[in-house]
Amino acid sequence: MKKEKTLLIIKPDGVERSLIGQIIKRHERVGLKLVALKFLVPTVEMIESHYTVDPEWLRKVGQKTIDGYRAKNILPPSEDPVENGKNVLRRLTKYMKSGPVVAMVWQGAHSVGIVRKIVGGTEPLNSDVGTIRGDFVTDSYIISGADDRAVRNVVHASGSVEEAEKEIKLWFGSKEILNYRLIQEEVLYDVNLDGILE
C-alpha cells in the first residue's frame, strides 16, 4: 500500500496557464513521491485509449451526463448513454490534443485517493476551495456543454487503483518509472518514529 501508484495529467489548460509548478508542489507537500514524468502532445489514439481503458467508460460517462442534466432540470442532449459518452469523448479528444500535457506517476500510501482529494471534483463549479480545480478553475458542465467543448478542469487523476495501473501502462514504459528513496519516507513510514532522537 505504501508504494501505491497513480497517474496525474496536467491538461493543456493547466500547462498554458503555467500551473505545473503549483500542481507538483501540492502533491510533493503532502508526502507523495514523483516517480515518472513526461511532457508531450498526446495523439488521438493515445487519448481515446486512455479514456476507454474501462470498456464501460462510454456508457458510464454518458449516464452520468444524463443524470447531471436531469439534476439541473435540463433536458439531456440524448437519452442514449453511449451516444452521450461518444460526444464526451469527442470533446475530450479535441481538448487533450490542443497542446502539451504533463503526465506524471505519483507514489505513496493511498496515492489514488490522496490525489483525487487534492485535485477536487471533476466539475470545477462543485469542487471545494483548497483543491486544484476549486482554486484555479471556474468552468462548469453547463458552460462547456453550451460551448460544445470539454470542461476545462486543469488535471486528470486516476479514479481507482485498477484504473491507475491500466492508465500508467498506457503512458509509461516500466523503465520510465524510477525506484528511489526520499528522506521524508523515513518519517512518513517509520513505524515507531524511533529514528528522530540521536
Image (tube, rainbow, N blue to C red):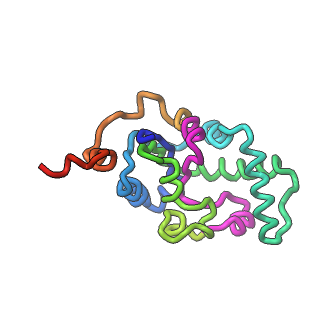
- Magenta range is 139-167
* Residue 100 visible, this orientation: no
Which quadrant would the N terminus be assigned to in this image?
top left
Determine which quarter of the picture holds residue 104. top left
Q: Residue furthest right?
A: 79
* Residue occupying the point 82% across, 50% down: 81
Nearer to us in this view, 165 or 93? 165
* Residue at x 41% of width, y 54% of height: 27
The picture places residue 162, in percent across and down from the top left corner, at: 59, 38
Asked if residue 67 lies left or right of residue 127, the reply is right
Q: Nearer the viewer, residue 145 or 44?
A: 145
Q: Position of residue 48 (x, y in %)?
A: 66, 40
Above or below: residue 174 compared with residue 72: above
Asked if one can make out residue 187 in the rendered structure from this viewpoint, the answer is: yes
Q: Residue 80 appears at what percent x and percent y?
A: 86, 51
Q: In the rendered view, does 44 fall on the left or right side of 156?
A: right
Which residue lies at the image location 56% right of the left edge and 34% below the top edge? 170
Which residue is outermost to the left? Answer: 198
Magenta stretch contains residue 43: no
User: Where residue 13 sits: x, y (%)?
Assistant: 53, 58
Residue at 48 percent across and 44 percent down: it is 103
Does 163 appear in magenta? yes
In the picture provided, is 38 more to the left or to the right than 126? left
Q: Give the mark count.
A: 0
Q: Nearer the viewer, residue 11 or 85?
A: 85
Q: Is residue 198 left or right of residue 19?
A: left
